[in-house]
Image (cartoon, rainbow, N blue to C red):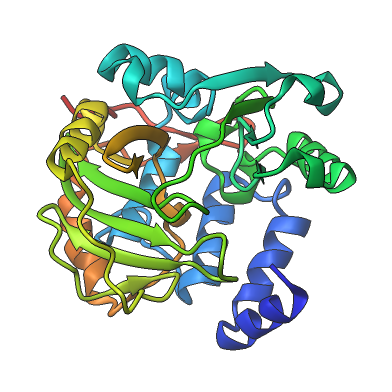
Amino acid sequence: MKIIDKLNKAIKKPNWLFGVILRRCFSRMLNDRNFIKWEYFSGMGKFPDLDNPTTYNEKLQWLKLNDIHDEYTLLVDKYEAKEIVRKRIGEKYIIPTLDIYDSFDDIDFDLLPNQFVLKTTHDSGGVVVCSDKTRLDMKAVRNKLEKSLRHNYFYEHREYPYKNVKPRIIAEQYMVDESGTELKDYKFFCFDGKCKMLFVATDRQSRNEPFFNFFDEHYNPLPFKQGHPINPIIPQKPERFEEMIRIAERLSVGYRHLRVDLYNINGRIFFGELTFFHFSGNVPFEPAEWDFVIGKWLKLPITYLKPKHDKDNKRLAFFSSRRCH
């Protein structure tokens, strides 16, 4: 994002600069609970109730502190997740992997096709989409990917699934939909294995800020926005939409909440990624009442022990059932 765009964002959202300072200067100094409280304040303008959360965003913070499992690390790893998903829903839904690398210098660009996608396996944003290898700015690509490889995404928002993901670079087949320039993202919000809503991300490559349009599970538009503007041209319901719902629900079985990202390329469905903490629970809904509405869908344990700091004051221990069954 350009500097002027960041300044405009800061003016519109006064706490934005505070959030940047928090993550850049204090991300490794504060314990999890305090960091999460202050980051939530930077995004939402208030502190979360971490003991008795009621909104969707508050409950995501609670899950960060209490729902910690090693298997989540594999599910957010962009390479390992494909192997797990392949076993659940089949090979035909997986975007082909061209290669996997431990470092940028391991990439042999001569062996890659003219069009491909490179992405780091452990974070958000480390993506390079190459539509023409002859025009690829190798220096810029190196800088972006090496910076991403050095970055531990856990310290951005204290999302434990990302803490121990092995930083690697995955090369994937280049994919476009009917537009010929980019893919629409379909992101399904599942609760206890049932899809309740989704949003469609459009114009991610052609605009500085993409459009996010929210829909219910029947593809009826929902009257709110979050983080990004609504596309005035409502994206058409994709082919095989009901199958996309079934796939999302099958992948989310056994988890209180999981966002399943899929692509639909001219009627062919492909897996994107899995997300446990949408927007890290730090972006307001407009109108705010939807934060409460969606929060009701996310069921936390009725009884649980109050979290407490562990010995090194880095994590919160939790001693009751964490998974839904």
Residue under the image location 56 percent in, 44 percent down: 158
Q: Looking at the image, can residue 103 be seen?
A: no
Instruction: Tell me how many marks there are.
Output: 0
Q: Considering depth in this image, is 33 or 309 the residue closer to the camera? A: 33
Residue 202 on image: x %, y %: 42, 62
Query: Which residue is rendered at x = 66% and y = 50% of the image?
Result: 30
In terms of depth relative to the viewer, which is nearer, 169 or 237? Answer: 237
Q: Quadrant of the N terminus?
A: bottom right
Q: Is residue 8 left or right of residue 53?
A: right
**Quadrant where the C terminus lies?**
top left
Image quarter of residue 127: top right
In the image, residue 306 above or below residue 81: below
Which residue is most to the top? 87
**What percent of the width, then of the height, locates residue 130?**
67, 42
**In which image quadrant can residue 9 be found?**
bottom right
User: Is residue 113 shown to the viewer in this render?
Assistant: yes
- Residue at 73% x, 72% y: name it: 2
Q: Residue furthest right?
A: 139
Which of these two is toward me, 323 or 214? 214
Q: Residue at x 22, y 42 (%)?
A: 190
Q: In the image as oriented, which residue stretches furthest toward the left?
A: 218
Horizontal relation, residue 310 to residue 3: left or right = left
Q: Where 193 sits versus 300, above or below?
A: above
Q: Where's residue 309, x and y in %?
A: 52, 38
User: Seen in the image, is 147 located left or right of residue 202?
Assistant: right
In the image, residue 314 above or below residue 87: below
Residue 123 versus residue 46: which sits nearer the camera? 123
Against 289, is 107 above or below? above
Task: Measuring from the top left, give residue 16's x and y in whole percent.
Answer: 62, 74
Snapshot quadrant of residue 136: top right
